[in-house]
Image (cartoon, rainbow, N blue to C red):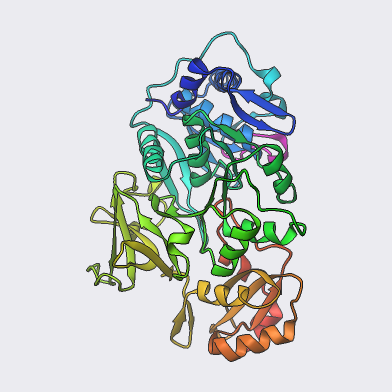
Amino acid sequence: MNLSDLLRRHAESTPDALAYVGDGIAFTYRDLDTLIDTVAQRALDASVRPGHRVSLAIRRDLPILTAILALARIGAVSINRLDREDPCDVCMATPENGPSTVARTIDVTEDWFTRAAASREGPVTPFAGGDAVCRIFRTSGTTGKPKFVAMTHASLLQRLALRARASPLPSPVRSLSMVRPGSSYGFQVTMRVLSEGGTVVDAPYLNGLPAAIVRQRVNYLTISPGILAPLIAQMQPGEGPFPSLALVEVSGARLTAPLARAASTRVSPHLVLLYGSTESGIVAIAPYPEIAGRDGAVGHVVPGVEVEAVDAAGMPVARGTDGILRFRGETVATEYADGSGHAKAFRGGWFYSGDMGRIDADGVLVIAGRTDERINIGGEKLAPEVIEQFAVSLPGIVDAAAFAFPSSLGIDRVGIAIVAGPGFEFEPFKERCNAELGIFSPAIVLNMAAIPRNENGKVPRHALVKLVPAAAQATD
């Protein structure tokens, strides 16, 4: 089965149902399926063929979703472009992104993705799909260079089926995702909604999100903690909670207790935590009230995925004991594409996630931090999430991201980026950090308008290191 058949099925059975809406945008399933055919035909006319790897230098959500499905329909493999030297057979790029330096570039303009552009000359016959690669997703790359996971039509369909079994959606669903459809998580959310005949709402800028939820009667919101925090901070007094929201799915980073309480009061009480990765797909999920008060808890392990906590030698540790988390199952990848990434991540049929954590006696998965992000100060190690959770518990801290940076002697020191709100005072903040964090008290504080996050909502800590002034790194 071709992944794009999920949408064509509804285009044939409920052609006039709304598939995608937004300000000035309204596509029925017939419209969207026809537009996918049109873009697919343009790609064919430009000599794109099954198996070709096509990098997409396209930014807006609807165009990138359409391009991914159009290429899938003709059997080509899509990947989002990271830079102009990405290896590929063809590049599809909008003018502001410029051409590829290593491959032929198809110029894509905004008018490709309008209802007026859709041709009704006849449908494109879908490529068979199945075990052919459909899309290559980049991992979050929070600690350095991103890696690549190739997903087939069949494996993406398996992941969608697992999500459907693990968590039902409101019906009829009207979904707004603040996680971009070019990412693995965002794409699965969007395709899950379209596979169920629901309506996808075009994501607005953050300051337009409250109005869009009300205007579009959104009942399913997907969001990362990094976007949830500034959303609440910029909401007006008396604004929210939103009665239409029946499900708010939070994923991508740790949801702290203060942020969860604020979100339950200001956004919706129907919070659900989801944990997974590009390599594994969904691993655990739970309504927040079921795991509230348990630091690091992310949900119950979903059926079909096996999780173990192991020691450095790969031996399972006792239940309830922290270890390195590894996963396996029908939806878990078994290797990185093109030899990218680290071979040690896949061993003996397991994916070693790089997360530290445990499974408690009741089957709840608890995350303790990252093995490759722990800050090492004089031999003492601490997960940056612990520092972040402490920071956001202090008055006036809206969001935070901790990281390590080297001094001139090569000794790691702690840095923290913060988003300060009303009530923040620097000196009391530093005093509390010194008193309670000890050697892990930040040596430098970056006060930012927003914490940088990638399309999965995760913090690229290596990028924060580059923001530390040279003078700070030169002092001991």
Position of 370 relative to 189 (above/below) = below
For the C terminus, which image quadrant?
Answer: bottom right
- Up the image or down, 274 lies above or below 214; here it is below
Residue 55 located left or right of residue 27: left
Instruction: Locate residue 252, reporting x and y percent.
Output: 51, 56
The question of residue 97 being in magenta is answered with yes
Q: Nearer the viewer, residue 220 or 475?
A: 220
Q: Residue at x 25, y 67 (%)?
A: 314
Which residue corresponds to the image point at 59% horizontal and 34% vertical from the top-left? 200
Q: Is residue 177 magenta?
A: no
Residue furthest top in the image? 121
The quarter of the rendered structure image containing the N terminus is top left
Q: Is residue 10 left or right of residue 452?
A: left
- Residue 400, relative to residue 45: is it above or below? below
Q: Nearer the viewer, residue 205 or 407?
A: 205
From which residue to which does the magenta span run? 92-102
Residue 315, quarter of picture = bottom left
The number of numbered discs placed on residues in the rendered structure image is 0
Residue at figure coordinates x 29%, y 44% from the top left:
330
- Residue 60: % across, % down: 66, 38
Q: Is residue 428 left or right of residue 357?
A: right
Q: At 43% from the left edge and 86% from the top edge, which residue is drawn?
A: 379
Q: Is residue 205 visible from the viewing direction of this image?
A: no
Residue 338 figure quarter = top left
x then y, percent, for residue 99: 65, 37
